[in-house]
Amino acid sequence: MAKITIDPKVFNKVYKKYLESEERYQIFYGGSGSGKSVFVGQRALYWHTKEKGHNTIIARKVGDTNRKSTFPLMKQLINDWGFGKIFKINESEMRIKNKFNGNEMVFVGLDNPEKIKSVTFESGIATSVWLEEASEFDAEDLQQLNLRLRGKSKVAKTIWISFNPIHANHWLKAKFFDRTVEDSFICHTTYMDNSFIDDVYKRELESMKETDPYHYQVYCLGHWGVTGRTVFDGQKVSERLAELKQYHLKEKPLRGTFIFEYENEQIVDDSIKFIPDEKGIITIYEKVEEDKPYVIGGDTSEGGIDFSVGQVLDNTNGKQVAVLIGQMDTDVYAKYMYCLGKYYNTALIAIESNFDLHPIKELQRLKYRKQYQRETIDKISRKVHPKYGFQTNRVTRPVIIDELKIVVRESIELLNDEATLDEMLTFVVNEKGKPEAMEGKHDDLIMALAIAHKAREQQHYTVTPQKERITGTWTTQELLWRGLTKFEIKQMAKTKQINLIK
């Protein structure tokens, strides 16, 4: 057989670096017209021509759809590349065989599980699987196809997954996007990456920017969408996610953790340091600014099932500037919240008190002086007593969620954390009308953010130099003009730092 040459110009530039990739899981997703399916087909043809030992299972959820999609695509590529004399095409069985090296492609559907189990090749074993329109498959389908890649082989065994994302609750997102999967890569592309797209089709897609902005985000730009009745504005959340994904490619947020010295059962404040760590539990979007006021909302893990979270806001504008999230014991969580609070100018910390009071009490033991306070009435004396921590109940929960809905609707640019926005896409109204996370999803980031926004009322709103200590005689209105809150004014009067007059 003569040497075969393939013109590199047949490949879209954005995909060329994946031509020789050998990762186990190879994810190609994005919008319509991005050319991802064509490239996966091109690469299959490239591999099957390049060397002996490749056998590919090309799968659709319903087998017969191959006859109208992947099978004619491969035949067209063979024709376009002038490989008609190299490959033998079996129309009835939907099999394509390289006549010189014996490599085969077989087209199957998961609607006939027994047929999958009986797939064999004349020479060797299955070395790759292509799941086209993978959003149609179930997680069990992937598992079944994965099991087909068994036995010894001289070439890498790979799984190619191509699809247009549908909704944020899809199993593909949970499996490959919400966590790190070893030996894998993810390639996201849109019609703008396709150098072969015609101008008419491109204009049709771009016209959706004005006629149907949400459809444009999901269908054209390939961002995860929402289904069902979501609590937060799905379009705004999706659009903000798209903006952040592009921005964070250029300006990657700082991720890391805190280290500190611990002496006499206390954290040494001067020893607290933030160190970069790609696997750290803290993500910083904006570094601390001198004298700025900050608030931190906290939501603790319930029995180790959920995550412990801290959401940091710049209180001058409500912007999300940092996030802490991880699974840890409550005493460890309290120490990290202490460090996070100290890092952000001794921020006001408001931790939910419903499930576990230990983080709040631990902050008290560590002598953290600035925690959110709520008023409670003693059942016997009927006197009002302040208590630390935010209590989420049937009265306060709807309020803080509604207030966060307003932030999302009117000031979505204040949110900087992609994971928080992802949670919002799966935070829905259940059958009884209660807002909650979809089954199998979380709401820790949402609740911590909602608490943080509620806590803003107990922190001042303007930059106040630390050296400026307010003393003397004031009216409440004068202090409000200086950016203090009613809560702070009350505390200053109580400690006799100021003399409050009417």
Image (cartoon, rainbow, N blue to C red):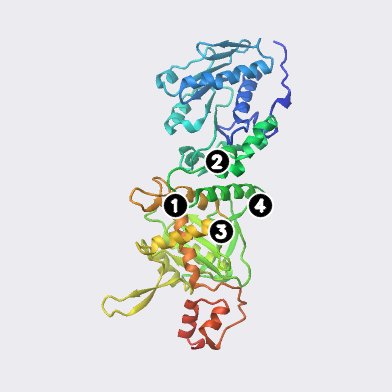
Real-space Cα distance between discs 3 and 1? 16 Å
Which residue position holds label 2?
215
Foreground: 373 or 337?
A: 373
* Residue type of the residue flagged with mark 1: Val
The x and y percentages for residue 72 are: 58, 18
Q: Which residue is mark 4?
A: 251
Q: How many marks?
A: 4
Badge 3 or badge 1: first in the primary sequence: 1
Of pointers 4 and 3, the one earlier in the residue sequence: 4
Q: Are marks 2 and 1 in contact (CB under 8 Å)?
A: no
Q: Which residue is mark 1?
A: 231
> Mark 2, mark 1: which one is toward the viewer?
2
- Name the N-terminal-most of marks 2 and 4: 2
Seen in the picture, residue 64 relative to 407 is either above or below; the reply is: above
Question: Between disc 2 and disc 3, whose residue precedes?
Answer: 2
Dot 3 corresponds to which residue? Answer: 411
Q: Is 69 above or below relative to 360?
A: above
Q: Amino acid at mark 4?
A: Glu
Name which quarter of the figure residue 351 lies in.
bottom left
Earlier residue among tags 2 and 1: 2
- Rounded to the nearest angstrom, the CA distance separating label 4 from label 3 is 21 Å
Name the secondary structure under disc 4.
loop
Give how far apart the Cα atoms at labels 2 and 1 are. Answer: 19 Å
Q: CA distance from mark 2 to mark 4?
A: 27 Å
